[in-house]
Amino acid sequence: MTVTTDAPGTLPTHADEARLWALIEAAWADLGAEPLALRQALVERDPAASADGDDEDGPSYPIDAWLDAFLNRIGQLTAELTGQELTDLDRVVERKLHDIDREDIHGVTDGSDDGFLYARGFIVALGQAYYEAVRADPAMALLDADCEGMCYLFAHLHNDRFGSWPETGSGISRESFGNPAGWSA
Protein backbone atom coordinates (compact mmCIF):
# COMPACT_ATOMS: atom_id res chain seq x y z
CA MET A 1 0.00 0.00 0.00
CA THR A 2 1.51 3.31 -1.04
CA VAL A 3 0.08 6.32 0.71
CA THR A 4 1.17 9.87 0.16
CA THR A 5 -0.55 12.95 1.37
CA ASP A 6 -0.67 16.37 -0.13
CA ALA A 7 -1.04 18.36 3.05
CA PRO A 8 -1.13 22.11 2.52
CA GLY A 9 2.11 23.94 2.97
CA THR A 10 5.51 24.06 1.42
CA LEU A 11 6.45 20.88 -0.43
CA PRO A 12 10.00 19.74 -1.08
CA THR A 13 11.18 20.35 -4.63
CA HIS A 14 12.34 17.50 -6.85
CA ALA A 15 15.80 19.08 -6.78
CA ASP A 16 15.84 19.06 -2.98
CA GLU A 17 14.72 15.42 -2.92
CA ALA A 18 17.42 14.50 -5.42
CA ARG A 19 19.96 16.41 -3.32
CA LEU A 20 18.98 14.48 -0.18
CA TRP A 21 19.26 11.07 -1.83
CA ALA A 22 22.57 12.03 -3.50
CA LEU A 23 23.93 13.27 -0.17
CA ILE A 24 22.94 10.04 1.55
CA GLU A 25 24.58 7.99 -1.21
CA ALA A 26 27.75 10.08 -1.06
CA ALA A 27 28.01 9.70 2.71
CA TRP A 28 27.61 5.92 2.51
CA ALA A 29 30.03 5.66 -0.43
CA ASP A 30 32.68 7.55 1.53
CA LEU A 31 32.52 4.84 4.21
CA GLY A 32 33.62 2.12 1.82
CA ALA A 33 32.47 -1.15 0.34
CA GLU A 34 31.29 -2.94 3.49
CA PRO A 35 28.36 -0.65 4.38
CA LEU A 36 27.40 -0.40 0.71
CA ALA A 37 27.18 -4.20 0.55
CA LEU A 38 25.18 -4.35 3.79
CA ARG A 39 22.70 -1.79 2.47
CA GLN A 40 22.36 -3.63 -0.83
CA ALA A 41 21.72 -6.88 1.04
CA LEU A 42 18.83 -5.23 2.90
CA VAL A 43 17.30 -4.03 -0.37
CA GLU A 44 17.63 -7.48 -1.92
CA ARG A 45 16.79 -9.60 1.14
CA ASP A 46 13.87 -11.96 1.44
CA PRO A 47 11.55 -10.21 3.91
CA ALA A 48 10.29 -13.59 5.13
CA ALA A 49 13.77 -14.36 6.52
CA SER A 50 14.29 -13.75 10.23
CA ALA A 51 16.60 -11.08 11.60
CA ASP A 52 20.21 -11.97 12.29
CA GLY A 53 21.81 -11.28 15.65
CA ASP A 54 18.86 -11.04 18.03
CA ASP A 55 19.90 -10.18 21.57
CA GLU A 56 18.10 -9.37 24.81
CA ASP A 57 17.46 -5.80 23.62
CA GLY A 58 15.91 -6.92 20.35
CA PRO A 59 17.32 -7.44 16.88
CA SER A 60 20.60 -5.91 15.82
CA TYR A 61 21.73 -5.55 12.25
CA PRO A 62 25.28 -5.36 10.86
CA ILE A 63 24.58 -1.94 9.29
CA ASP A 64 23.95 -0.52 12.80
CA ALA A 65 27.71 -0.38 13.40
CA TRP A 66 28.00 2.14 10.55
CA LEU A 67 25.16 4.54 11.40
CA ASP A 68 27.16 6.93 13.60
CA ALA A 69 29.92 7.22 11.00
CA PHE A 70 27.26 7.80 8.32
CA LEU A 71 25.61 10.61 10.31
CA ASN A 72 28.99 12.20 11.03
CA ARG A 73 29.84 12.07 7.33
CA ILE A 74 26.55 13.80 6.45
CA GLY A 75 27.51 16.56 8.89
CA GLN A 76 30.88 16.93 7.18
CA LEU A 77 29.38 16.95 3.69
CA THR A 78 26.94 19.70 4.65
CA ALA A 79 29.44 21.90 6.51
CA GLU A 80 29.27 24.67 3.89
CA LEU A 81 25.50 24.67 3.33
CA THR A 82 23.44 27.75 4.07
CA GLY A 83 20.62 27.83 6.58
CA GLN A 84 18.11 27.71 3.72
CA GLU A 85 19.78 24.67 2.19
CA LEU A 86 19.67 22.83 5.53
CA THR A 87 16.01 23.82 5.94
CA ASP A 88 15.27 22.47 2.47
CA LEU A 89 16.91 19.15 3.34
CA ASP A 90 15.04 19.02 6.65
CA ARG A 91 11.78 19.58 4.75
CA VAL A 92 12.55 16.59 2.53
CA VAL A 93 13.35 14.34 5.49
CA GLU A 94 10.20 15.55 7.25
CA ARG A 95 8.12 14.64 4.18
CA LYS A 96 9.78 11.24 3.75
CA LEU A 97 9.19 10.38 7.41
CA HIS A 98 5.59 11.59 7.17
CA ASP A 99 4.86 9.58 4.03
CA ILE A 100 5.97 6.29 5.63
CA ASP A 101 4.10 7.02 8.87
CA ARG A 102 1.73 4.17 8.06
CA GLU A 103 0.01 1.45 10.01
CA ASP A 104 1.23 -1.29 7.66
CA ILE A 105 4.87 -0.26 8.15
CA HIS A 106 4.42 0.09 11.91
CA GLY A 107 3.05 -3.45 11.94
CA VAL A 108 6.48 -4.66 10.79
CA THR A 109 8.80 -2.28 12.66
CA ASP A 110 6.84 -2.16 15.92
CA GLY A 111 7.81 0.46 18.45
CA SER A 112 6.36 3.21 20.58
CA ASP A 113 5.81 6.71 19.24
CA ASP A 114 9.53 7.46 19.42
CA GLY A 115 10.54 3.94 18.41
CA PHE A 116 8.47 4.11 15.26
CA LEU A 117 9.90 7.52 14.40
CA TYR A 118 13.43 6.13 14.81
CA ALA A 119 12.54 3.10 12.68
CA ARG A 120 11.42 5.46 9.93
CA GLY A 121 14.66 7.40 10.39
CA PHE A 122 16.51 4.15 9.74
CA ILE A 123 14.52 3.60 6.55
CA VAL A 124 15.40 7.08 5.25
CA ALA A 125 19.05 6.81 6.34
CA LEU A 126 19.58 3.66 4.31
CA GLY A 127 18.81 5.57 1.12
CA GLN A 128 16.30 5.81 -1.67
CA ALA A 129 16.44 2.18 -2.82
CA TYR A 130 15.62 0.85 0.64
CA TYR A 131 13.07 3.60 1.30
CA GLU A 132 11.23 2.80 -1.93
CA ALA A 133 11.41 -0.95 -1.22
CA VAL A 134 9.73 -0.41 2.17
CA ARG A 135 7.13 1.97 0.71
CA ALA A 136 6.19 -0.64 -1.87
CA ASP A 137 6.37 -3.64 0.49
CA PRO A 138 6.29 -2.88 4.23
CA ALA A 139 7.56 -6.41 4.91
CA MET A 140 10.96 -5.11 3.75
CA ALA A 141 11.17 -3.01 6.94
CA LEU A 142 13.05 -4.39 9.93
CA LEU A 143 11.81 -5.01 13.45
CA ASP A 144 13.14 -2.48 15.96
CA ALA A 145 15.78 -1.02 13.62
CA ASP A 146 16.43 2.62 14.40
CA CYS A 147 18.38 5.66 13.41
CA GLU A 148 17.17 8.38 15.75
CA GLY A 149 19.87 10.75 14.51
CA MET A 150 18.42 10.89 11.00
CA CYS A 151 15.00 12.12 12.10
CA TYR A 152 16.08 15.68 12.95
CA LEU A 153 19.63 15.66 11.58
CA PHE A 154 19.33 18.74 9.37
CA ALA A 155 17.30 20.63 11.98
CA HIS A 156 20.03 20.01 14.56
CA LEU A 157 22.74 20.98 12.09
CA HIS A 158 20.82 24.20 11.36
CA ASN A 159 20.42 24.94 15.05
CA ASP A 160 24.09 24.23 15.80
CA ARG A 161 25.34 26.38 12.95
CA PHE A 162 22.82 29.23 12.88
CA GLY A 163 21.33 29.24 16.38
CA SER A 164 17.74 28.55 15.38
CA TRP A 165 15.44 25.70 14.57
CA PRO A 166 14.45 25.70 10.88
CA GLU A 167 10.87 26.41 9.86
CA THR A 168 9.98 24.05 7.02
CA GLY A 169 6.57 25.59 6.35
CA SER A 170 5.24 22.18 5.37
CA GLY A 171 2.24 22.00 7.68
CA ILE A 172 2.93 18.30 8.41
CA SER A 173 4.51 16.37 11.24
CA ARG A 174 7.28 13.81 11.11
CA GLU A 175 6.20 12.49 14.50
CA SER A 176 4.63 9.04 14.70
CA PHE A 177 0.94 8.59 14.02
CA GLY A 178 0.73 12.11 12.55
CA ASN A 179 -0.17 11.08 8.99
CA PRO A 180 -3.96 10.53 9.05
CA ALA A 181 -3.87 8.95 5.58
CA GLY A 182 -1.55 6.21 6.86
CA TRP A 183 -3.79 4.96 9.65
CA SER A 184 -7.23 3.39 9.72
CA ALA A 185 -9.83 5.35 11.59
Image: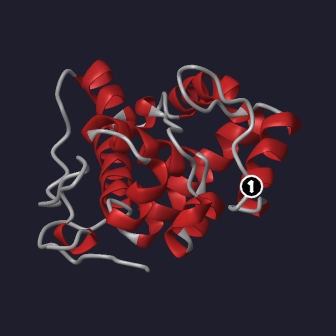
Task: Say which amino acid is labelled 1.
Answer: Ala
Q: Position of residue 16 (x, y in %)?
A: 43, 60
Q: Quadrant of residue 60?
A: top right
Residue toward you, 92 or 36: 36
Q: Which residue is pictured at 40% across the width and 38% down the height?
A: 118
Q: Quadrant of the C terminus?
A: bottom left
Determine which residue is flagged by label 1: 49
Q: Is residue 2 above or below residue 35?
A: below
Q: Quadrant of the N terminus?
A: bottom left
Q: What is the tally of numbered marks visible in this picture?
A: 1
Q: Which residue is pictured at 55% across the width and 60% down the height?
A: 131
Residue toward you, 63 or 109: 109
Q: Position of residue 24 (x, y in %)?
A: 60, 46
Q: Position of residue 156 (x, y in %)?
A: 31, 27
Q: Position of residue 78 (x, y in %)?
A: 50, 34
Label 1 element class: loop
Q: Which residue is pictured at 54% across the width and 75% down the height?
A: 136
